[in-house]
Amino acid sequence: MKKLPAAAEDTVMTSLPGGAVQFETRVPGRVPGSYALYTNQVGADGTTIGYTKTTVVPDGSIAHIKDKLLP
């Protein structure tokens, strides 16, 4: 959560099978009605197994999905 933008809304935590946990946070965009959805999956051992940023435009469609684990 330290790496999220300052405007981030509350983080929602969801339990996944096998003891993994998913954290999801919505961050309002610069364009009114747009937002980014940061999703982080953490395994039972505490290692990050997935981290994506999904950009959604005002009409609700997905502009792109970026894998944040890749360099």
Image: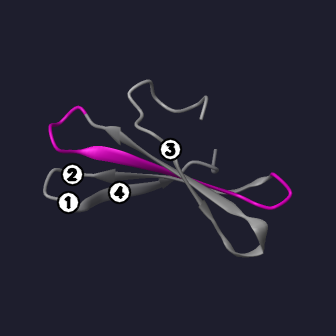
Comparing labels 4 and 2, the label whose residue is closer to the camera: 2
Give the residue at mark 4: 64
For mark 2, what is the residue? Answer: 57
Distance CA(mark 4)–CA(mark 2):
9 Å
- Circle 3: is it few (<14), some (14-19), or many (20+) Cα within 10 Å? some
Residue 53 rendering spot, x and y as whole percentages: 46, 50
42 left or right, relative to 12: right
Residue situated in front as seen by the camera: 38 or 19: 19
Q: Residue at x 44, y 24 (%)?
A: 6
Q: Quadrant of the C terminus?
A: top right
Secondary structure at badge 2 equals: loop
Residue type, mark 3 in image:
Thr
Residue 70, horizontal then vertical, whole percent:
63, 50
Location of mark 1 (residue):
60
Q: Is residue 26 above or below residue 43?
A: above
- Amino acid at pointer 4: His
Q: How far is the residue under mark 2 from the one under mark 1? A: 6 Å
**Number of residues whose C-alpha sits closer than 10 Å to that of mark 1, classed few (under 14), some (14–19) or many (20 or more):** few
Q: What stretch is highlighted in magenta?
A: 30-46
Q: Do the residues labelled 2 and 3 touch (CB within 8 Å)?
A: no
| SS for dot 3 | loop
- Classify mark 4: helix, strand or loop: strand
Q: Residue furthest bottom?
A: 17
| Mark 3 and mark 4 residues within 8 Å of each other at the beta carbon | no
Q: Where is residue 31 in the image (x, y as percent from the top left)?
A: 17, 36
**CA gap, disc 4 to disc 1?**
12 Å
Mark positioned earlier in the residue sequence (3 or 1): 3
Task: From the viewer's perspective, tell me whether residue 12 is left or right of residue 64.
Answer: right
Q: Mark 3 points at which residue?
A: 11
Are discs 4 and 2 less than 8 Å apart at CB?
Answer: no
Q: Residue at x 17, y 44 (%)?
A: 33
